Image (cartoon, helix red, strand yellow):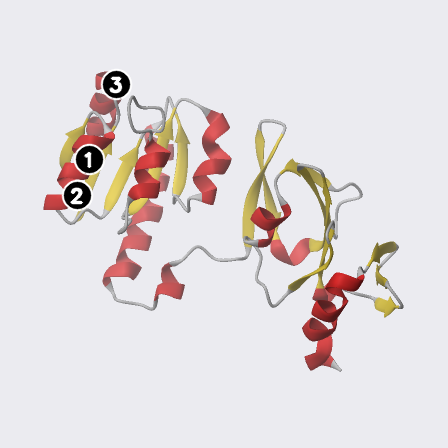
Amino acid sequence: MIKCLAVDDEALSLDLLEDNIKRIPFLHLVQRCRNAYEAMDVLRREQIDLIFLDIQMPGVTGTQFLQSLTYKPVVIFITAFKKYALEGFELDVLDYLVKPVTFERFLRAVNKAADFCTLKKQGLPSAAVQPTNDYFFVNVEYSLVKIAVQEITHMESIRDYMKIYLLKNDKPVITKLAMKSLADKLPPTRFVRVHKSFMVSIDKITFIRKNRVYIGEHVIPVSDFYKEELHRAISHKL
């Protein structure tokens, strides 16, 4: 049985959420909470497996509440606003549902949560229950675009935006994201910073000549500051 909380400041949303939860036999709703403070109080008393969490709430928002937790149950965001989706993924929420939520979509999210909770209860190493580095999502013109890590050749930073170059795309994916935020999503053994504005996939490098990295037809500058970092990254391949 998965013990869950429903956290939303709207009574109607809580009613609909409770109805959906009651239709799933392996879910047990411990309590309905109208704000983050009520949820915090429950978490002090109960071991909760799963939280259905609204984002825009008075006082403490859903994201602020989530960031405050030292122990984080599995979290599924349920909100009326698509614009918070990227923030949700950056906080490692398991799924992001936009109201109104169909029962079929709700059930898909719950089944994913059930699999995740099973792994945690089996006591597998933490790496086994963390989201994988196979892909991530970026916000592009009010849509979430899935980026497969193995498809990335290199990335270029232009002010507040990132251009992500992919093997099978003629044009880069452009998203508003800082270089560090993007680097945190990538496995550090497979990507290396070669310039303040460029990061490359080590596996996709065609050759290196002087202060240039060549990836297919792309020529990427290597700054003196990052030259040693590049050499360290490829040294085990020499």
Is the residue 68 above or below the residue 123 in the image? above
Q: From the top left corner, tell me how far across and down residue 28 is, in percent.
A: 15, 41
Residue 128 is labelled as none
Q: Does residue 158 appear to the left or right of 116 in the view shown? A: right
Residue position marked by numbered label 1 in the rendering = 39
Q: Secondary structure at mark 3?
A: loop
Q: CA distance from mark 1 to mark 3?
A: 14 Å
Work out whether residue 28 can be spotted. no
Q: Residue at x 30, y 33 (%)?
A: 53
Q: Secondary structure at mark 1?
A: helix
Q: How many marks?
A: 3
The amino acid marked with disc number 2 is Leu
Q: Residues within 10 Å of mark 3 (few under 14, many from 20)?
A: few
Residue position marked by numbered label 2 in the rendering = 43
Q: Does residue 123 appear to the left or right of 234 in the view shown? A: left
Q: Quadrant of the C terminus?
A: bottom right
